Amino acid sequence: MIPSYQFNHVEPYSRKGAHRKNSTKRKCSMFDIRDEMIRAPHACDHVTDPQPPNLIFGLPPGEAFDMAAARAAQAVDKIGRRLRPEALVVLVGVATWPDLTAHVQQDAEARDLYVQWRDATVAWLQSQWGDRLVTVVEHMDELRPHVHYIVLPELEPDNRLRIASVHPGFRAAANCADAGGKPREQSKAYKAAMTAFQDCYYEDVGVCFGLFRIGPRLQRLTREEWKERKRQAEILAREHARIDDRLATIKRQAREFVVEKTAAANAAAESKINGIETQSRHDMMMLKQEANRRMAILRGREQALRNELEEKDALITAQEEQLAHALERLAIYESGLGRDAGR
């Protein structure tokens, strides 16, 4: 790939495009962008052989724009009126890889590098917007491969839908206005925020793939200076790749070390558990034997007590019989004395 500058552009859209300045024509609406993104027949005259987009992350584009429209329909402005159709309600961006699509598709190494850039870009988008990033699609049917992404602002508790919550430039301008900044100061804050947005993408993604932050025209470089910048970018990209390889090796070695130590720890733990288990079985056997011995003693004592009770019961029974016999004889004797007295 020939080193080139990065391209990552974001733009807010409304349900109905606003009128262009000094013109009766309107700007593109979010539905125009949706149709171009999904390759609707009437919206892709610029593409020789339109192909459906590849969904890389999140919702299909149609569902994402439907969600944006549904939120906009519920939203109100700052005085509680229904949101105007021209109000900005969705943020759409595009990031482009500078290599030619044909080369990416035909060369395995070029394809691998492109996929690395694409995945790094998606990860960066997620780091910027989190759950508000709802869709990323890939187009491989134009001159250069690129990804489109859709970011939706949340419908807030007061039913406001603030595009500044997802657009860094609008957010900076709004904060400046809230602080009492004049329109000129708000414009400067907007530009500074968008520059910081591009700088962040460059530092986290672009520089890792040898891309330039800005092109030669904006930098006003001579051809020799631009060639030197290209050479430096190639060196920088190789160094980043070398660092990434080294990090991958360190991570692999760390995983192997952890696996080895974990296996050793597991073996030691298993050995200790087996020892404890063996000792526990021995202790349980000894306790069981002691319990059986004590149970046998108790059973013997119980049987002796039963025998003793039985003997005592037999003695008591014999004594009761003797007593009953004596009482019977006494009754007979007393009865005889009574008859003798009557005579």
Image: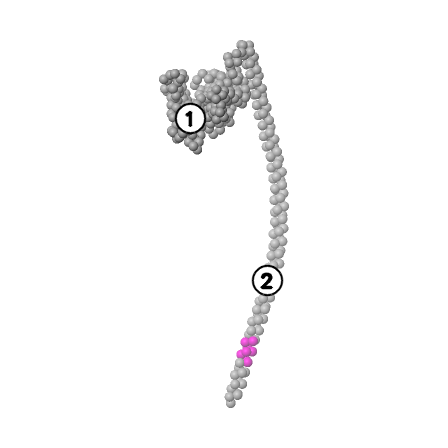
What numbered label is drawn on residue 306?
A: none
Label 2 sits on a secondary structure element that is helix
Residue 1 in sight here:
no
Instruction: Identify the main secondary structure in magenta.
Output: helix
Q: Which residue occupies 47% across, 29% down?
A: 131
What numbered label is drawn on residue 89?
A: 1
Residue 156 in sight here:
yes
**Is there a contact, CB below 8 Å, between mark 1 and mark 2?**
no
Q: Residue furthest bottom?
A: 343
Residue kind at label 1, given as amino acid type:
Val
Q: Position of residue 165 (x, y in %)?
A: 47, 27
Q: Please state if 121 lies on the left or on the right of 266 as rendered.
A: left
Q: Which residue occupies 61% across, 44% down?
A: 277
Of 173 and 207, nearer the camera is 173
Of 254 and 152, nearer the camera is 152
The magenta region covers 323-330
Name which quarter of the figure residue 16 lies in.
top left
Q: Which residue occupies 61% across, 49% down?
A: 284
**Magenta includes 329?**
yes
Q: Position of residue 216 (x, y in %)?
A: 52, 13
Residue beneath label 2, please?
303
Distance from the alpha carbon under mark 1 to that under mark 2: 94 Å
Q: Residues within 10 Å of mark 2 (few under 14, many from 20)?
A: few
Q: Position of residue 305 (x, y in %)?
A: 60, 64
